[in-house]
Image (cartoon, helix red, strand yellow):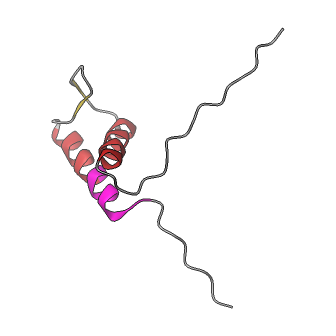
Amino acid sequence: MAKKAKKRKYSKGAAEKVERAMKKRKAGTLRSGRSKKKVSSRKQAIAIGLSEARAKGRKVPKKASKKRRTAKR
């Protein structure tokens, strides 16, 4: 039996947005949010690229939701 092809998690457009963000980070021109601070973190650059892709309506999985903890007594 042949294996079933896996579906793509991120669209090609999303990958291009992340790639552009990474290139800007390497060039030292990527800035974040309202503070406009320079981004040096690789993870932050990826997050910015994915965020821009979401805003453009590209196929990107939803953000991971924080798990709530019950208060200890």
- Asked whether residue 15 is drawn in magenta, I would say yes
Q: Quadrant of the C terminus?
A: top right
- Magenta part mainly helix, strand or loop? helix
Does residue 14 appear to the left or right of 36 in the view shown?
right
Q: Position of residue 31 (x, y in %)?
A: 21, 31
- On screen, residue 70 versus residue 73, left or right, reads left
Q: From the top left corner, tell me how far across and down residue 29 is, in percent.
A: 15, 36
Residue 54 shown in magenta:
no
Residue that extends furthest to the bottom in the rendered view of this protein: 1
Q: Quadrant of residue 59?
A: bottom left
Instruction: Report the side of 32 relative to 51 (left or right).
Output: left
Q: Quadrant of residue 27?
A: top left
The one nearer the camera, 50 or 59, is 59
Please tell me whether residue 72 is drawn above or below residue 42 in the rendered image. above
- Above or below: residue 1 compared with residue 18: below
- Name the spot of residue 13 as percent of width and height, x first: 30, 60
In the image, the segment drawn in magenta is 10-18
Residue shown at 21% from the left, 24% from the top: 36
Image position of 65 (left or right of 40): right
Q: Residue furthest front?
A: 57
Residue 69 in percent (x, y) is at: 72, 23
The residue that appears at 48% across and 61% down in the rendered structure is 9
Which residue lies at the image location 59% right of the left edge and 31% below the top edge?
A: 66
Q: Give the residue at the far top of this rendering.
A: 73
- Quarter that holds the N terminus: bottom right
